Image (tube, rainbow, N blue to C red):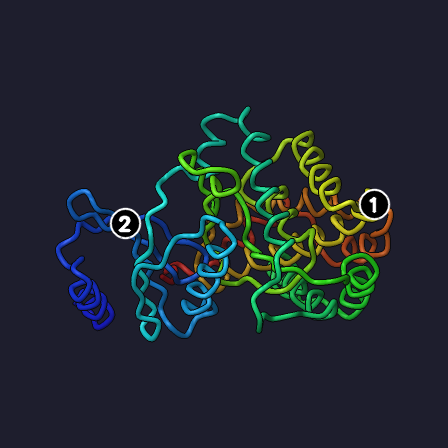
């Protein structure tokens, strides 16, 4: 038993979960992993979040408390060791949106509507203090993962991203740099659970929110409706955007530019993140998602407000043809990181 496994066993022993059945539940793009604990009829979820990474277990715990204070269904933190990165969480079950939608696609609008209502409720409340508040330039720099990692992996050369950054920053300042709200950043079907035994917006269980920060109102809506892992029907996307616009009394044309700009920024960053996960972390499975993200990027760039950005991206970023994706995968190290 290695040192971390021994520390985890001791943590569970102290809580009375030492004899629990432990079953792998999930892992993700980070070093974080989850197990379901079972002891008789009782269940809980163990989060093993090694310290020193980008994800802070203390941030997860604090955000969970904030979301629950608003009547939202984040998992209750039952026990924690924030120094070592161990948390025991309320078990919200297995009805992930992604799983339900795969099994029953016609439920899409019925499930996404309450998820949009969660965002409306969340953004109507004051955010917790001390959250990161990035500038338009910072958001553009985050999207520079596209030239720095995707274009580099695809072409073998890292392009000069100066004009890319200037153009994206200008678009963000013009269309997506207004008053901030709390955004959760990874608000999509893999991180939402359906809880039909609860009422109203509490029927939507929320996972993976430790990166929450201040941002633009449309960001989490883009995350939900332009999901890197699954297609959302165009009619559903349009209906959910209309639901959000009507509830917030926004100008539809201005919001369309806002939404497209944030969608382009997010898609650009994801292209780079998925490429980096292959090159650095040995996780080529994310390359299979790149064609969908590329399609989302192209739809966003088709908005007239982003014509300058489209020209820049057409110059810097090659389309993810099968040959290019194969080239990127060949650069993936043979032994993946945890």
In the figure, is residue 44 to the left or right of 231?
left
Q: Quadrant of residue 79?
A: bottom left
Residue 278 in the image, given as x and y percentages of width and height: 49, 57
Residue 205 in the image, given as x and y percentages of width and height: 45, 45
Q: CA distance from mark 1 to mark 2?
A: 45 Å
In the figure, is residue 338 to the left or right of 298?
left
Which residue is identified by label 2? 36
Viewer-closest of 128 and 187: 128
Q: Residues within 10 Å of mark 2 (few under 14, many from 20)?
A: many
Q: Quadrant of the C terminus?
A: bottom left
Viewer-closest of 182 and 285: 182
Q: Quadrant of residue 333?
A: bottom left
Q: Secondary structure at mark 1?
A: loop
Which residue is identified by label 1? 251
Q: Secondary structure at mark 2?
A: strand
Vertical comparison of 294 with 274: above or below? above
Residue 228 in the image, given as x and y percentages of width and height: 57, 45
What residue lies at 68% left-to-right and 32% top-to-bottom? Answer: 234
What residue lies at 16% left-to-right and 52% top-to-bottom? Answer: 20
* Nearer mark to the viewer, of 1 and 2: 1
């Amino acid at each position: 038993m290695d040192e971390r496994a021994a520390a985890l066993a001791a943590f569970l022993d102290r809580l009375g979960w030492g004899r629990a059945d432990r079953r792998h539940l999930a892992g993700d793009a980070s070093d974080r992993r989850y197990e379901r604990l079972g002891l008789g009829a009782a269940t809980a979820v163990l989060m093993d979040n090694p310290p020193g990474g980008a994800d802070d277990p203390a941030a997860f715990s604090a955000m969970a408390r904030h979301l629950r204070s608003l009547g939202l269904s984040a998992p209750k933190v039952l026990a924690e060791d924030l120094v070592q990165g161990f948390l025991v969480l309320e078990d919200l079950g297995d009805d992930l949106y992604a799983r339900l939608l795969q099994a029953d696609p016609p439920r899409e609008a019925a499930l996404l509507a309450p998820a949009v209502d969660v965002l409306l409720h969340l953004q109507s409340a004051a955010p917790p203090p001390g959250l990161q508040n990035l500038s338009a330039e910072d958001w553009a720099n985050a999207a520079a993962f596209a030239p720095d990692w995707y274009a580099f992996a695809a072409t073998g050369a890292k392009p000069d991203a100066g004009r890319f950054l200037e153009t994206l920053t200008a678009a963000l300042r013009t269309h997506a740099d207004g008053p901030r709200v709390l955004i959760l950043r990874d608000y999509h079907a893999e991180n939402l659970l359906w809880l039909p035994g609860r009422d109203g917006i509490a029927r939507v269980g929320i996972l993976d929110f430790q990166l929450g920060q201040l941002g633009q109102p449309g960001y989490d809506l883009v995350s939900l409706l332009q999901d890197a892992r699954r297609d959302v029907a165009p009619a559903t996307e349009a209906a959910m955007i209309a639901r959000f616009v009507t509830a917030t009394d926004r100008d539809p044309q201005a919001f369309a530019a806002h939404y497209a700009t944030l969608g382009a920024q997010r898609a650009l960053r994801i292209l780079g993140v998925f490429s980096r996960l292959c090159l650095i972390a040995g996780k080529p499975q994310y390359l299979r998602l790149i064609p969908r993200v590329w399609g989302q990027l192209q739809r966003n760039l088709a908005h007239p407000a982003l014509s300058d950005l489209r020209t820049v991206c057409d110059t810097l970023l090659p389309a993810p043809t099968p040959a290019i994706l194969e080239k990127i995968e060949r650069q993936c190290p043979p032994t993946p990181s945890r």
